[in-house]
Image: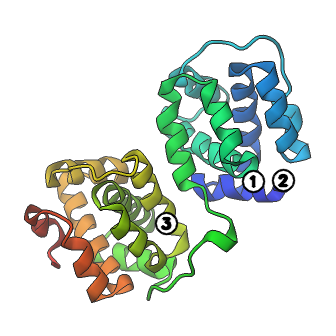
Amino acid sequence: MDYQEFVTIVGQVADISDEEAESVTRLTLRTLARRVTPGEAERLGRRLPEPLRPSVEPTGPPERFHVDEFVRRIAEHTGLDAEAVAEQARGVLAALWRAVGPDGFEDLRAELPPDFYPLMDTAVAAAPPPAEDEPPFTGRLSGEELLDRVAEGAPTDRARARRATEAVLEMLGLRLPAGQADGLTPLLPPPLRPALRRGRARGRGGTVPLSPDVFLHDVAMRAGADRAEAARDVRAVFAALRETIGDREYHDTVAQLPGEYRPLMRQG
């Protein structure tokens, strides 16, 4: 992987500019290098693009801190809140997974405490696969068109439309069987697929029971909306999904959800 590809993945996953991605990449890698052994830092450096290798140069024995402290140290330098820092660190870890490969990433994981694992799992799920592994897009709406439909249907602004759409897709990734989620992926615009993958990673390949109340609460929290606004957002997202994936796939998808979800969708 070259340097620009690494930065592009960070920016894509974290939804930040290339300039911001470059800065947070170096900061996150420096902080991570302080947590692992010098040998692991050296192994990471050998697999990183040359401009990033100084960021993981060993500086001494590993420091023993947990993921909250990892996030806090990055936040201290960026001035961002913990949620924003975690999202940006997820982007760096996603690019790191692509750069070092699954085996290298597992070696890194083995040196970190279990409270790092959820962040690492969602990073892997959010990482865009190599182009040759990404299924071709066969849906009816582009990412921009889908978000426009959500913003118009809610109604809300584009930023909240994106947050709500990604929250719904992540919850579906948790709730749907793996086969159904796999069938849905090619019909989703590529920029929105990482949200579905994050849900699948959180569920560790299983189907997680979620009540409509929990589903709606999560969307409200992630979209920065109150409950009534979130309910409108969810209905708008399902309507836009139906338009892009088609009636047959839509009905196959909602058939996997309990009947009490119907009022949330108002489409099935």
* Quadrant of the rendered image containing residue 34: top right
The amino acid beneath tag 2 is: Tyr
Please report the residue visible at 39 percent of the width from the left and 51 percent of the height from the top: 205
- The quarter of the picture where the C terminus appears is bottom left
Q: Is residue 20 visible?
A: no
Crowding around mark 3 (Cα neighbors within 10 Å: few <14, some 14 to 19, many 20+) is many
- Disc 2 crowd rating (10 Å Cα; few below 14, some 14-19, many 20+) is some
Position of the N terminus, as image quadrant, is: bottom right
* Residue type beneath disc 1: Val
The residue where tag 1 is placed is: 7
Q: Which residue is mark 3?
A: 193
Is residue 164 at least partly visible in the picture? yes
Tags 2 and 1 touching, CB below 8 Å:
yes
Q: Which residue lies under the disc numbered 2?
A: 3
In primary-sequence order, the first of circles 1 and 3 is 1
Callout 3 secondary element: helix
Q: Which of disc 2 and disc 3 is earlier in sequence?
A: 2
Q: Which mark is residue 175?
A: none
- What x and y, as percent, mark residue 202? 40, 46
Residue 226 in the image: state x and y as whole percent: 23, 51
Q: Is residue 261 left or right of residue 86?
A: left
Q: Which amino acid type is shown beneath numbered disc 3?
A: Arg
Left or right? Give the position of 105 relative to 146: right
Q: Nearer the viewer, mark 1 or mark 3?
A: 3
Mark 1 touches mark 3? (CB < 8 Å): no
Q: Nearer the viewer, residue 7 or 76?
A: 7
Vertical relation: 227 (above or below) 147: above
The quarter of the picture where residue 39 lies is top right
Q: CA distance from mark 3 to mark 2?
A: 23 Å
Q: Residues within 10 Å of mark 1 (few under 14, many from 20)?
A: many
Between the C-alphas of marks 2 and 1, the distance is: 6 Å
Percent x, y for residue 190?
54, 72
